[in-house]
Amino acid sequence: MNKKSNRLFSGASPEEVQQDLLPLVDFQSAGQPLAKLNQLIEEKLLPHLMRYDHAGFQSMYNSIPEQGAALGAQIALAHNQGVTNWQVSPGGAMLEELCCKSLCLLFQLSAQADATFMYSGTYANQQALYLAIHKKAELQGFDFGKEGMAGFRDPSRLVILTSRDAHFSINQSARMLGLGEQNLVSLEVGTNRQIDPQQLYKTLAELKGTKDVCCIVATAGTTSTGTIDPIETLLEAAQQCNAWLHVDGAYGFSFSLLPECRAQFQGIEKVDSITWDPHKQLGIPIPNSVLFVNNKQDFARISLFSHYFNRESSNEPNPGIKSPPSTRPMSVLPLVTSLLHQGMDEVLEKLRIPLQNIKRLTEHLMTQGDFRCWHEPDTGVLCFQHQPSHVPENHRNDLQTFIYETILSEGKRSISVTQLGDAVVLRILVISPSIHYDDLIETITDIRSIGMRFTDTVKEPHETANHQSQ
């Protein structure tokens, strides 16, 4: 990262970044010494990379590698192990198998649970939906892996239910699996952005007889607000309609490790599948995502064998039969070395700090007349609006966008913006435990300062007309 500057990143425009990076893709016949390459990267690329270790980075689910994780990543890179099966890496394959079992115990999942490492949470969600559709096909008497969508008497009846605040990877998965977005049913959320149980059961009643629910997707830590859906309620609904229940816990599942947060995850040990991204607040290098299943036999629905690789008769560990990639890195090692280096007490304490700081920020903003919080945070995310008295209500959305764009262009800190219903809201996310409450207050001070500049950028229509007539 660019340690010579106190900026979060250069603040350069896309055109300026492009101009700086052109020498990095000017491939020549003659090679360059490593020292020259290193200097080129330091001068041209590093200033434009986001500093995830910067206290002003309060926008996305990214972090720099934790020290123990960095050690594991270096070892994995040095040996360049593929861990699909025993043939390509006995140690890598066995380590992944053992780690998956230990993670199931750590998260207090069922005795029959299992897991597999994935390239991203998006792919984990996609595989979970595939397993859900496969199970629905079995209930209708055919093998989805062999017959595909054509095996269903009427594929248009298949639907997936998910929150309107669910991650867009659920939409992507529906597309990739051949369902199409028209087979997604969006569930309304309540005042705190959770799936509304009453609306859920109303929707199920409306679909009965005309649609077949193959999967309900809950989110444990929605992207926009970090909200945790009522998992136990959704589990009961899924059991009633004989559907698969998947929990997208890419961000939030880590918090289930905290004893004080466990009640929010009531029923998690009974769901069919869970997505988890250790590369988020645990600081494990990308790629590092995990898909859990409640019953290890469920992975058989995705398994494929060959005569030379992943042979069906093999008794050695073959992680590759639990997910599609036939080549993948030893992602398990950085997670293992990180947890060993820190110890679970330190891991849990680092998880608590963002929760405490966001809660404290929320309590502060609720006492401020020029701010309005949009939800009570379940995790380390808070959405809010700056509402100074000099900005009329019909320009509040424009103000939030102006604040976001101004902060981004200055390169000193990073927040994000999203839309909840008709409202454009600012969004602060705390991933790193090195971000303190005072850092968040500095962001609020900056937001207020930028809000004052908005006065000259907006004029009411009658004001503009009067000015022109003069």
Image (cartoon, rainbow, N blue to C red):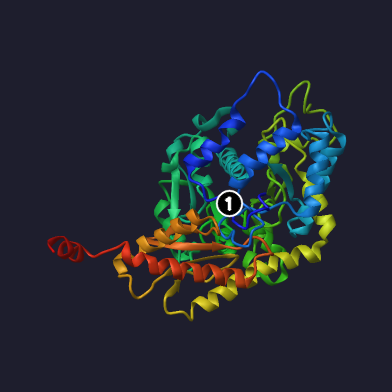
Q: Does residue 210 appear in the picture of this structure?
A: yes
Instruction: Give the percent coordinates (x, y) of residue 274.
Output: 65, 51
Q: Residues within 10 Å of mark 1 (few under 14, many from 20)?
A: many
Q: Is 298 left or right of 200, judged from the image as shown? A: right
In this rendered view, identify the residue nearer to me: 53 or 468: 468
Question: At x 67% / y 34%, what residue is drawn?
Answer: 324
Q: Is residue 31 above or below residue 193?
A: above
Instruction: Give the percent coordinates (x, y) of residue 195.
Output: 49, 61
- The residue sitting at the right extreme is 91
In this rendered view, identify the residue nearer to me: 458 or 201: 458
Question: At x 54% / y 63%, what residue is drawn?
Answer: 428
Instruction: Give the percent coordinates (x, y) of residue 301.
Output: 66, 37
Q: Is 393 left or right of 292, judged from the image as shown? A: left
Q: Is residue 414 above or below residue 30?
A: below
Quadrant in the rendering for residue 92 = top right
Q: Does residue 100 appear in the picture of this structure?
A: no
Question: At x 51% / y 53%, what residue is drawn?
Answer: 166
In this rendered view, identify the residue nearer to me: 447 or 364: 447
Mark count: 1
Question: At x 84% / y 43%, what residue is drawn?
Answer: 95
Q: Secondary structure at mark 1?
A: loop
Residue type at tag 1: Phe
The residue to which callout 1 is attached is 9
User: Which image quadrant: the C terminus?
Assistant: bottom left
Q: Is 172 left or right of 25, judged from the image as shown? A: left
Q: Is residue 240 above or below residue 160?
A: below
- The residue sitting at the left extreme is 469
Q: Is 393 left or right of 378, judged from the image as shown? A: left
In this rendered view, identify the residue nearer to me: 390 or 164: 390
Instruction: Give the percent coordinates (x, y) of residue 194.
Output: 50, 64
